[in-house]
């Protein structure tokens, strides 16, 4: 494709293109030095380990939730961060969502820092260490929630505790909103939004879990990149259902319920949703492409004019990159007859769908029906959310997030991106146009792969830098 581009760009066009490429460089300017005063890496690690030991596992079945563990977690926070709990107002919403307010004495719109303290289960996973031991070994803190999202919660508390202890008052109010049911798409964060809305509070910016500092994920960019989510894809759960008369398996019918269901699934598989380069992904290419070697830079500098081609390149680059450019469908459950020798009267598949920006629940369902092209396949919507609005990246708040990143990761390129998972942050999009999804931790590919899986862990150093990130952010409001 680069060759094609070169061939097309002749004469003046070539010199314009060359100028464009030569200017397509990383932004100049040195980063502020890291601000890690009053932050003790080992003490923070020990506190995170303690909180990992409290098994706050969430479940969609209320009876399976260990409410005592959640209560113990909230009490332990008070003991671990006494200065914070002395200086900030705290309220418990619903079944245990926490909302803190750090008063500035000004009327400026506040900053909201979010995290959640529930974790996903460990059942069926092969851990090499006890997931709730909070073991610290070779500079790593092990256990469920070490990153997602007790790591972020601890980094926030470490920053606030150090600043309160030093007698610091923020330039605008800072709210801490910690959900207790994020992993089961619960109501904790929605209650926080309701509470703030009722009080007429409209945040200046909101920061929640999301992207991280990663290396080697963007083609041609070997160094660390901090990807900050400006939006998240929509989430749609649909059941595909076919029915049939049933009967004995010794006399089957052609085109029975399972066969029609299978055909529908294959049609979806063979007709993926179109790949498109959304504005946000274009922004990511623009920000990261500047750090790539010349060959790639020629391409990325002209990303705006090469959107279809770039979308195609990304869709083939990796499954993660593919998820950035299109609506994806994962068939996660299949069900037929309950007995081995009985024809199915009903066959069911569950489709977990992540809707790309620019599309909706409705447009997704319409396309699925068109592709399946079989009225005997019923689509039953279990739940559905449209993609979130896109947050601003042209403002002070986004620039501050970038500066805070560079203060602790001076080599990192900062780029916007689209989060492919759902998060609590989407609730805040209703009352704020600057909702950012970012975890200030540098994570290896293996560490990223351990999210929601076995052997979740975070390095003591990353936790320390994360606390430094929040400290910088709060000090520069
Ligand atoms: Zn999480």
Image: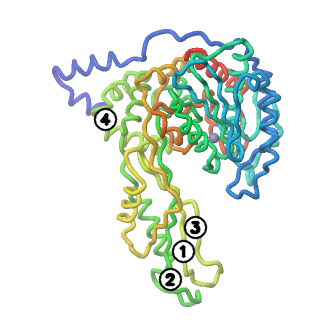
Q: Is residue 16 left or right of residue 165?
A: left
Q: Where is residue 151 in the image (x, y as percent from the top left)?
A: 70, 32
The quadrant of the picture occupied by the N terminus is top left
Say whether disc 1 or disc 3 marks the residue closer to the N-terminus. 3
Using a 10 Å C-alpha cutoff, classify the residue at mark 1 as few (fewer than 14 neighbours), some (14 to 19) or many (20 or more). Answer: many
Please give the residue where the numbered disc 4 appears in the rendered image: 1
Q: Could you give the CA–CA distance between mark 1 and mark 3, rounded to whole angstroms?
A: 8 Å
Label 3 sits on residue: 334
What element does badge 4 sit on?
loop
Mark whose residue sits in front, 1 or 4: 1
Q: What element carries label 1?
A: strand
Q: Which of 148 and 83 is in front in this view?
A: 83
- Viewer-proximal residue among 316 and 153: 153
Number of numbered markers: 4
Residue of label 2: 244
Q: In this view, does 6 lie to the left or right of 405?
A: left
Image quarter where the C terminus lies is top right
Q: How far apart are marks 3 and 4 (CA)?
A: 41 Å
Q: Are marks 2 and 1 in contact (CB under 8 Å)?
A: yes
């Amino acid at each position: 494709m680069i060759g094609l581009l070169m061939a097309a760009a002749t004469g003046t066009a070539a010199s314009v293109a060359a100028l464009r490429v030569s200017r397509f460089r990383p932004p100049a300017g040195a980063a502020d030095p890291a601000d890690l005063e009053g932050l003790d890496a080992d003490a923070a690690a020990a506190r995170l380990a303690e909180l990992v030991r409290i098994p706050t596992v969430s479940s969609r079945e209320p009876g399976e939730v260990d409410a005592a563990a959640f209560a113990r977690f909230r009490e332990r926070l008070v003991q671990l961060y006494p200065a914070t709990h002395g200086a900030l107002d705290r309220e418990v919403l619903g079944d245990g969502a926490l909302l803190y307010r750090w008063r500035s004495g000004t009327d400026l719109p506040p900053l909201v820092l979010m995290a959640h303290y529930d974790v996903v289960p460990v059942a069926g996973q092969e851990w090499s260490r006890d997931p709730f031991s909070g073991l610290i070994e070779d500079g790593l803190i092990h256990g469920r929630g070490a990153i997602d999202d007790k790591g972020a919660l601890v980094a926030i508390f470490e920053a606030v505790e150090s600043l309160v202890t030093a007698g610091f008052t923020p330039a605008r109010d800072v709210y801490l909103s910690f959900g207790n049911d994020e992993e089961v798409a619960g109501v904790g964060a929605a209650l926080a939004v309701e509470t703030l809305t009722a009080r007429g509070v409209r945040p200046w910016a909101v920061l929640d879990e999301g992207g991280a500092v990663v290396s080697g994920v963007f083609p041609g960019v070997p160094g660390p990149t901090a990807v900050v989510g400006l939006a998240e894809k929509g989430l749609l759960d649909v059941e595909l259902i076919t029915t049939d008369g049933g009967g004995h398996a010794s006399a089957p019918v052609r085109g029975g319920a399972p066969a029609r269901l299978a055909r529908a699934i294959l049609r979806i598989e063979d007709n993926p949703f179109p790949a498109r380069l959304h504005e946000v992904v274009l922004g990511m290419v623009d920000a990261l492409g500047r750090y790539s070697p010349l060959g790639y830079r020629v391409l990325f500098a002209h990303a705006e004019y090469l959107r279809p081609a770039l979308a195609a390149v990304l869709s083939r680059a990796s499954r993660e990159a593919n998820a950035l450019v299109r609506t994806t469908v994962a068939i996660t459950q299949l069900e037929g007859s309950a007995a081995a020798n009985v024809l199915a009267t009903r066959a069911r598949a569950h489709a977990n769908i992540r809707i790309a920006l620019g599309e909706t629940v409705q447009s997704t369902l319409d396309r699925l029906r068109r592709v399946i092209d079989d009225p005997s396949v019923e689509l039953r919507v279990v739940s559905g959310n449209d993609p979130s609005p896109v947050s601003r990246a042209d403002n002070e708040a986004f620039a501050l997030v970038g500066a805070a990143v560079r203060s602790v990761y001076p080599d990192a390129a900062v780029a916007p991106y689209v989060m492919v998972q759902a998060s609590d942050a989407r609730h805040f999009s209703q009352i704020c146009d600057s909702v950012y999804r970012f975890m200030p931790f540098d994570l290896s590919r293996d560490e990223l792969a351990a999210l929601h899986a076995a052997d979740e862990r975070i390095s003591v150093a990353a936790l320390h830098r994360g606390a430094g990130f929040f400290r910088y952010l709060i000090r520069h409001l």
